[in-house]
Image (tube, rainbow, N blue to C red):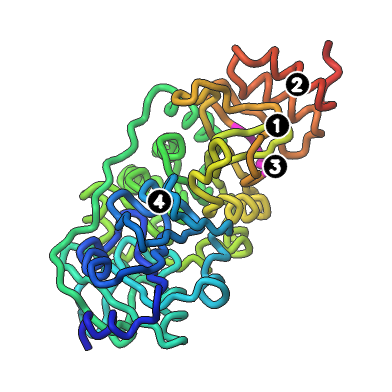
């Protein structure tokens, strides 16, 4: 069987699930796009450069820059832990496109991106769908759920294309200050999860003097390598994640490294499994946090910007972990929008709520275990930017969160 035969056998307007983030098989996706007049393109966190034309409908539960603001976008709200269920219910795949290593001993590795792909492959094969892999010597071999029998792939397409390297986040003074706030709360032996961006990255880099740390996370980047190089990670416990991206140095480190174990989303993002980790510390960020402790990390001006992702999964898991904590770390002032990120009441759908603490460069607002008025006071006094505190006090009074006059 070849690619032409596979594409000719697809139903009308097929659903094509493609490896996302920074592991997209660009050559293979281009071949498919040239051959199909119309199809539904399903990608998690799609990057710029995906096919953008009439006939291509975008589908995703997490919007990346390649799909953002597209009039052809069909966004499906879903916690990441529940996304695999979509493949057997409402969003069954007809074709799955992978970016893998070359076969070795009858197997390939998915490299840097496992995520929901095993579930997509299983769902496609169960209903007669097809699986095609773009193979390359330049994809790092990772272990765990990333390893796949060649027999589950219908066609291998040769393409000497590397996984896209991603430079480390630029950490400015504000991000470093927030990172220091987070790091001060993390002790030896904690288990770490961090989201994407300069603030979570700075938080992990501030932990290089700790010892016995563990990593159980949805994704990781170069900050985890920095912890490994500093001797901060427990050498007896593998780094476990669902996907990764970063510098060429990071990609070289994970290649054939038994210290790194890639796990599928159903494992990585299961709140019950997350809660079993000692001192589970979830570090995420948001666009806004309001005086009730509600966070919007998904929408801007009523438009979907990203999605729930794994934030809610890890917050719940961390709060149920022995000694665990869920931290929301963000700047007190949004530099692009030129407005406060601490607001009276979020005006967008809520992504998550009631974390342990909200941390900004201004300080730490403790939420867990406090009544709602105390929570609001902590947010205003310790997390909000000084220029909006008086306004927030007035709004707090109107919301019944303060008697201050």
In contact (CB < 8 Å): disc 2 and disc 1: yes
Does residue 363 appear left or right of residue 58 in this picture? right
| Distance in Å between CA atoms under marks 1 and 4 | 28 Å
Local packing at callout 2 (Cα closer than 10 Å; few below 14, some 14-19, many 20+) is some
**Could you say which is closer to the camera, residue 48 or residue 310?**
48
Q: Which residues are magenta?
A: 353-358
State the residue position of label 3.
354
The image position of residue 148, as x and y in percent, is 33, 78
Q: Is residue 31 above or below residue 129?
A: above
Asked if residue 259 can be seen in this view, the reply is: yes
Residue for badge 1: 345
Helix, strand or loop status at disc 2: helix
Viewer-closest of 27 and 110: 27
Residue 395 bears which disc, if any?
2
Q: Which residue is mark 4?
A: 67
Quadrant in which the C terminus is drawn: top right
Q: Tell which tag, 1 or 4, sits nearer the viewer.
A: 4
Q: Secondary structure at mark 4?
A: loop
Q: Contact (CB < 8 A) between labels 2 and 3?
A: no
For image coordinates 53% across by 60% down, the residue present is: 80
Left/right of residue 317 with respect to residue 304 in the rendered view: right
First in residue order: circle 1 vs circle 4 = 4
Q: Where residue 201 sits: x, y (%)?
A: 41, 39
Pick whichever of labels 3 and 1 is earlier in the sequence: 1
Q: CA distance from mark 4 to mark 3?
A: 30 Å
Residue drawn at point x = 46 percent, y = 86 percent:
127
* Residue 241 visible in image: no
Separation (CA) of disc 3 from disc 1: 14 Å
| Residue at 41% across, 88% down | 128
């Amino acid at each position: 069987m070849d690619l032409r035969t596979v594409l000719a056998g697809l139903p009308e307007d097929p659903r094509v699930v493609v490896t996302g983030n920074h592991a997209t098989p660009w050559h293979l996706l281009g071949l498919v796009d040239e051959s199909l007049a119309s199809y539904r393109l399903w990608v998690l966190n799609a990057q710029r450069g995906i096919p953008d034309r009439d006939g291509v409908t975008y589908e995703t539960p997490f919007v990346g820059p390649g799909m953002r603001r597209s009039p052809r976008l069909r966004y499906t709200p879903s916690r990441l832990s529940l996304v695999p269920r979509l493949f057997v219910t409402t969003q069954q795949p007809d074709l799955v496109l992978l970016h893998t290593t070359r076969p070795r001993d009858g197997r390939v590795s998915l490299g840097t991106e496992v995520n929901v792909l095993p579930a997509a492959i299983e769902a496609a094969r169960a209903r007669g769908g097809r699986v095609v892999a773009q193979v390359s010597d330049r994809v790092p071999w990772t272990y765990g759920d990333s390893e796949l029998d060649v027999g589950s792939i219908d066609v291998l397409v040769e393409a000497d294309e590397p996984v896209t390297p991603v430079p480390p986040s630029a950490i400015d003074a504000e991000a470093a200050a927030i990172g220091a706030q987070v790091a001060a709360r993390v002790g030896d032996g904690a288990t770490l999860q961090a989201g994407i961006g300069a603030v979570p990255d700075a938080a992990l880099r501030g932990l290089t003097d700790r010892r016995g740390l563990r990593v159980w996370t949805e994704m990781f980047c170069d900050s985890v390598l920095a912890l490994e190089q500093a001797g901060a990670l427990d050498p007896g416990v593998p780094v476990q994640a669902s996907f990764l991206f970063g510098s060429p140095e990071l990609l070289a480190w994970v290649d054939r490294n038994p210290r790194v174990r890639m796990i599928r989303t159903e494992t990585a993002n299961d709140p019950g499994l997350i809660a079993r980790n000692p001192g589970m510390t979830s570090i995420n960020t948001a666009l806004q946090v309001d005086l009730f402790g509600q966070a919007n990390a998904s929408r801007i001006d009523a438009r979907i910007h990203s999605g729930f992702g794994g934030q809610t999964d890890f917050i719940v898991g961390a709060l149920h972990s022995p000694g665990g904590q869920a931290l929301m770390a963000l700047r007190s002032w949004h530099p692009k929008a030129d407005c406060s990120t601490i607001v009276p009441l979020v005006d967008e759908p809520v992504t998550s709520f009631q974390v342990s603490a909200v941390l900004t460069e201004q300080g730490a607002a403790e939420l867990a275990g406090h009544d709602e008025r105390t929570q609001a006071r902590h947010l205003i006094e310790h997390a909000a930017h000084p220029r909006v505190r008086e306004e927030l006090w007035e709004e707090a009074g109107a919301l019944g969160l303060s008697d201050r006059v």
